[in-house]
Amino acid sequence: MAFRLATFNVENLLTRFDFSGFRNELRQDRTLRLLDIRNEAVYREMEVARVVAATDDTRQQTALAIADTFSDMICLQEVESLDALTAFEANYLFRMVGNGYQHKYLIEGNDSRGIDVAVMMRDRTADGEAIEFVTIRSHAHLTYEEANLFSSDLAPLEKPENRIFRRDCLEIDIKVGGRPLTVYVVHFKSKGGTRGLPPGAAGSDPTLPVRRAEAAAVRGIIEKRFGPDGVKRANFAICGDMNDFMEQVTVTGDRRSGYRFTPEAVPGSALTVLAAGGFAENVVERRAPLDRWTHYHARGPEDRHLCQLDYIWLSPALARINAGRLPEIVRGGQPHRTVFPPGQEVERYPRIGWDRPKASDHCPVVMEIDLS
């Protein structure tokens, strides 16, 4: 049997408008910054018009990217609510794949912006194997103190009683053709600068201790569930946007003279927690070093790189059974500003823009797996 498991950060699948940009320029869309808007009522009208005009193209492209995964189960990040996911599936994704993802799961997590992790799932695989929902658990409540993960490097940022996960670690048990599979869906703390952080939290990556604790918490949850020996035999996968990477492809040059792509190791990643001791395998590492990226980062010509932010980690048992398989990365929804290494260019979806509209700032990752 073949079961296709995917993950995708759909970038702000929201049903609400954000009008805070009238008073906070940092939250104001760049389109409206070109205009002299002095009245909040006028600002609200224009923000509604901007969002409505942009959303249709964006969500068509998001749906095309999901359709191109041909997945049986897809783990999603940045979904506002089950209502938002249902409306998107019914009005956009249904047009691409028909009556496919009938089952949707979301439990509200900890994010202050209200973006959660979620799952969509089919009834059957393409081979006709039944996909059965068993149970779902949220770990959003877990604190540093409860997990025994509070440390001195977290002290400038957190308190022992604070919740570890910035969103959640959603644990979902299913059976595929009667075979068990447990999937953990995460969206780790984003990287950021020192703006708004307390004294003592400065550094090139001040948020690293939070992601390291999140990774350790995920590992701890799995080890507690299956036991030290059971982890080696269990069918589990960890999926999501981890906002961290162990390597990057640095991009230099320009359109006129040509681009150069240099793979480089990135020390100090929080994800070494999941890789250590063969606990799980990042299957995207099976692809060539220049072809592992799921996100393009660019803050001017001096700071550009391609990196993997989106992961499917397989348990030792699943990695062994599927040793000969490669994950796929769907890049047709990337904007035209994304610089592709030679030989990786794809046909973009209709109406993709230079920077936007786009399917997302992330690429879906999908892996076809057999279960033991």
Image (spheres, rainbow, N blue to C red):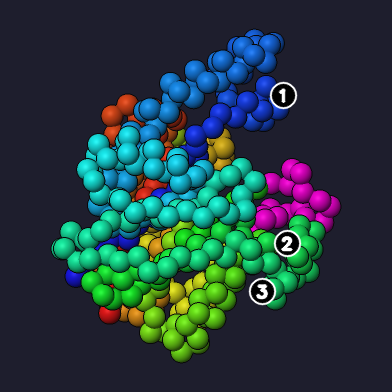
Would residue 318 be counted in the magenta stretch?
no
User: Within 10 Å of the Cα at label 3, are there few (<14), some (14-19), or many (20+) other Cα atoms?
Assistant: some
Q: Is residue 58 above or below residue 63?
A: above
* One can see residue 123 in this view: yes
Q: Secondary structure at mark 3?
A: helix
Q: Residue at x 44, y 74 (%)?
A: 280
Would residue 194 be counted in the magenta stretch?
yes
Q: CA distance from mark 1 to mark 3?
A: 39 Å
Asked whether 7 or 290 is in front, the reply is 7
Where is residue 45 drawn, in percent x and y? 56, 15
Where is residue 99 drawn, in percent x and y? 23, 46
Q: Secondary structure at mark 2?
A: loop
Q: Secondary structure at mark 1?
A: loop
Residue 16 falls in which quadrant of the image? top right
Report the magenta stretch's main SS.
loop
Q: Residue at x 76, y 67 (%)?
A: 160
Q: Residue at x 55, y 70 (%)?
A: 218
- Left/right placement of residue 368 relative to residue 56 reads left
The magenta region covers 193-208
Where is residue 144 drawn, in percent x and y? 70, 68
Q: CA distance from mark 2 to mark 1?
A: 30 Å
The answer to which of marks 1 and 3 sits earlier in the sequence is 1
User: Within 10 Å of the Cα at label 2, are there few (<14), some (14-19), or many (20+) other Cα atoms?
Assistant: some
- Left/right placement of residue 19 relative to residue 88 reads right
Residue lying furthest bottom in this view? Answer: 229
Q: Is residue 56 above or below residue 184?
A: above
Q: Which residue is mark 2?
A: 162
Q: Which residue is mark 3?
A: 147
The kind of residue tagged 3 is: Ala
- Left/right placement of residue 115 relative to residue 236 reads right
The kind of residue tagged 1 is: Arg
Q: Which residue is mark 1?
A: 23
